[in-house]
């Protein structure tokens, strides 16, 4: 009897141990796999070009060099402008976007608003069917004159139905009694939204702002479609262009001159330059990450439960 | 008490503030979502810039004829479906596994750190991922090739050999999505009633029995909903990923071209509005039909899983 109990206990211990091994092992492995590429890019950006050419990319800069960064910042106005464009788009876009999203979500969760289901479907339907790339492109370029217009970078990312659904499901969890009390005190619909619903929805507002901000920060697609003017490039598309042009640029210089005077240009730190540009473009995201992550997790959780 | 039906005008007046608050989003959606739906009719037109969408001459099914006789339609459709299926199956399996494992781990700090690291790739753009891919895979200096040659093996020119790309694309898709997905499933696991686990423990169930008999069945509704959402988008390729990783590398097209990249190239590179709008509408219609069909089937099986 005693022995059987002991055996059972030992077995229970065994399965827990096995799970711990698998659990710590697999999740540790995946976590490391998610981190390593970042370290590689960081390391390569600080590695001397010859080392990369000779030995390839490594996890640690074997021969430390700041050459790539001095090249990136040789003309700080260029990357500075791309930075500024992206920052302004991100700030303006996420502020206006979250306001529109919250306002709409507030109305659609009001139970006394008879048309809320119909209008919700009006929004929801656009996730089921869309006109596709070509009509949108023609609309933007031919009818709205958005080619080389900052609005082409601002408008497409401002409002999304997914964000609306997340916001609405958060707001419908806010007790109605608070709103009703304000109504009885004579607050109008907008005032109730502004003074009561919005402050009470702070976590959702923070989450949605970050969702929208991330979309702006990472956007290169709209720039590729609508922006030809180099001076208007946002950060990601600037990086995209640089990465794809560096090799081409090097070739052109080699063909044109080939002389000793151009030797310096040929020895442009291309590989490490790509990596340094990547670090400069990703930096703010990584720095903001520890603060932002919490809100993302909350947002995803709201979305997962309700949507 | 009068039962007189309130008129439309009366309601508009009553709701005027609420309607004003809806106005920006409604206008936005009309302009950027509904107008292009009408514009999708251009797939049946011989579009020219001067006449625009509405005044260009009709041309019947000619654009679709060109699209289907290009020899590309079947290939890009199968690629789109195949890749999405792979992404869904491999991605979901790993996300669920990681979520379950993380939920069982006792060391809170390890759990938090692992989760933060896994979430990291979600935050970067596909442009950055393409730089990372190059860092790993380039022939001359890529990490994988450095390792291969240091082990005395032959280098692989990944960017000239299509056969590796299904695996590479699955890798990066999973890599970028694992944090987001596992957080979602972890949230669902956290919502499971803990008394069930306590009861199971008293009954002598081991941890694996607990996972397979309690956690997984409780995850099923979330899992099904998310799978349905994913299936609804099965005709939609992840343009961002394919275009950044493959770009204009024609050598890889056979194995990696999806409807979205095809449409994009037809529009931007060849300015073939007819072909591009035909393949685009073909995709939109199939997307819509899939969602509606899947939803109907699910509704028949279990109403609470349906999306709408």
Image (cartoon, grey):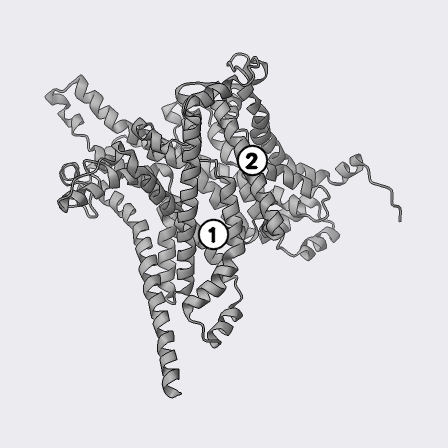
Query: Which of the labelled discs sits on residue B288, or is there none?
Result: 2
Q: Quadrant of the C terminus of chain B?
A: top right
Could you classify mark 1 by the number of other residues whose Cα lies within 10 Å: few (under 14), some (14-19), or many (20 or more)? many
Rendered position, B37 above or below B199: above
Q: Between B201 and A45, which is closer to the camera in this rendering?
A: B201
| Separation of residues labelled 2 and 1 (CA atoms) | 32 Å
Residue B232 on image: x %, y %? 52, 41
* B301 relative to B255 in the view: left or right: right
Q: Which residue is mark 1?
A: A295
Q: Is disc 1 placed on a helix, strand or loop?
A: helix
Could you classify mark 2 by the number of other residues whose Cα lies within 10 Å: few (under 14), some (14-19), or many (20 or more)? some
Q: In which quadrant of the rendered view does residue B252 lie?
A: top left
Q: Chain of mark 2?
A: B
Q: Chain of mark 1?
A: A
Q: Residue at x 39, y 32 (%)?
A: A234
Residue A127 on image: x %, y %? 56, 38
* A176 relative to A301 in the view: left or right: right
Q: Residue at x 77, y 39 (%)?
A: B11
Q: Between A229 and B124, which is closer to the camera in this rendering?
A: B124
Q: In which quadrant of the rendered view does residue A126 lie?
A: top right
Label 2 with label 1: CB-CB less than 8 Å: no
Q: Between B38 and A73, which is closer to the camera in this rendering?
A: B38
Rendered position, B56 above or below B278: above
Residue B199 on image: x %, y %? 51, 73
Q: Is residue B56 visible?
A: yes
Q: Is residue A46 visible?
A: no
Q: Is disc 2 placed on a helix, strand or loop?
A: helix
Query: Which of the labelled discs sits on residue B234, or is there none?
Result: none
Q: Residue furthest right?
A: B2
Rendered position, B305 above or below A125: below
Nearest-to-viewer mark from 2 and 1: 2
Residue B211 on image: x %, y %? 44, 64
């Amino acid at each position: 009897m005693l022995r059987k109990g002991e055996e059972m206990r030992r077995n229970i211990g065994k399965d827990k141990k096995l799970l711990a091994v698998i659990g710590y092992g697999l999740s540790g492995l995946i976590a490391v796999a998610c981190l390593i590429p970042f370290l590689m890019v960081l390391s390569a950006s600080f590695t001397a070009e010859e080392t990369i050419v000779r030995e390839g990319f490594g996890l640690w800069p074997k021969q430390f060099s700041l050459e790539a960064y001095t090249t990136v910042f040789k003309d700080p106005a260029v990357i500075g402008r791309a930075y500024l464009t992206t920052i302004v788009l991100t700030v303006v876009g996420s502020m206006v976007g979250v306001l529109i999203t919250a306002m709409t979500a507030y109305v659609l969760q009001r139970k006394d608003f008879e048309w809320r289901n119909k209008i919700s479907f009006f929004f929801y339907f656009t996730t089921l069917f869309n006109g596709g790339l070509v009509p949108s492109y023609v609309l933007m370029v031919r009818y709205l004159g958005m080619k080389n217009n900052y609005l082409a970078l601002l408008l497409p990312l401002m409002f999304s139905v997914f964000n609306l659904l997340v916001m609405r499901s958060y707001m419908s969890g806010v007790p109605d009694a608070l709103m009703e009390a304000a109504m009885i005190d004579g607050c109008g619909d907008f005032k109730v939204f502004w003074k009561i619903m919005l402050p009470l929805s702070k976590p959702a507002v923070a989450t949605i702002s970050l969702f929208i901000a991330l979309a702006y920060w990472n956007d290169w697609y709209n720039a590729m479609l609508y922006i030809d003017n180099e001076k208007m490039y946002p950060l990601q598309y600037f990086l995209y262009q640089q990465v794809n042009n560096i090799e081409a640029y090097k070739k052109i210089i080699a063909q044109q001159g080939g002389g000793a005077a151009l030797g310096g240009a040929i020895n442009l730190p291309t590989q490490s330059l790509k990596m340094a540009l990547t670090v400069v473009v990703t930096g703010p995201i990584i720095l903001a990450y520890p603060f932002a992550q919490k809100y993302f997790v909350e947002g995803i959780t709201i979305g997962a439960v309700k949507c | 008490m009068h039962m007189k039906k309130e008129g439309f005008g009366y309601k508009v007046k009553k709701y005027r503030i609420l309607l004003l608050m809806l106005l920006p989003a409604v206008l936005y959606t009309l302009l950027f979502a509904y107008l292009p739906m009408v514009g999708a009719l251009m797939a049946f037109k011989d579009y020219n810039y001067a006449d625009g969408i509405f005044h260009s001459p009709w041309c019947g099914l000619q654009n679709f004829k060109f699209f289907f006789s290009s020899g590309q339609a079947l290939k890009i459709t199968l690629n789109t479906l195949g890749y999405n299926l792979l992404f869904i199956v491999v991605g979901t399996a790993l996300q669920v596994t990681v979520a379950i494992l993380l939920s069982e781990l006792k060391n809170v700090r390890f759990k938090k750190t692992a989760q933060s690291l896994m979430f990291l790739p979600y935050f970067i753009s596909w442009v950055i991922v393409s730089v990372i891919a190059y860092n790993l895979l380039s022939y001359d200096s890529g990490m994988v090739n450095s390792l291969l040659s240091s082990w005395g093996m032959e280098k692989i020119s990944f960017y000239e050999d299509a056969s590796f790309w299904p695996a590479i694309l699955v890798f990066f898709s999973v890599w970028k999505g694992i944090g987001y997905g596992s957080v979602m499933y972890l949230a669902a696991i956290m919502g499971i009633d803990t008394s069930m686990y306590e009861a199971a423990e008293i009954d002598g169930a081991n941890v694996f029995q607990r996972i397979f008999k309690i956690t997984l069945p409780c995850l099923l509704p979330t899992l099904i909903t998310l799978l349905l959402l994913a299936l609804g988008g099965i005709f939609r390729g992840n343009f961002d990923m394919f275009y950044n990783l493959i770009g204009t590398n024609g050598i890889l097209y056979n194995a990696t071209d999806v409807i979205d990249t095809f449409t994009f190239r037809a529009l931007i590179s060849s300015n073939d509005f007819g072909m591009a709008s035909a393949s685009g509408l073909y995709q939109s219609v199939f997307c819509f039909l899939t969602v509606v069909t899947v939803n109907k089937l699910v509704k028949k099986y279990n109403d609470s899983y349906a999306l709408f």
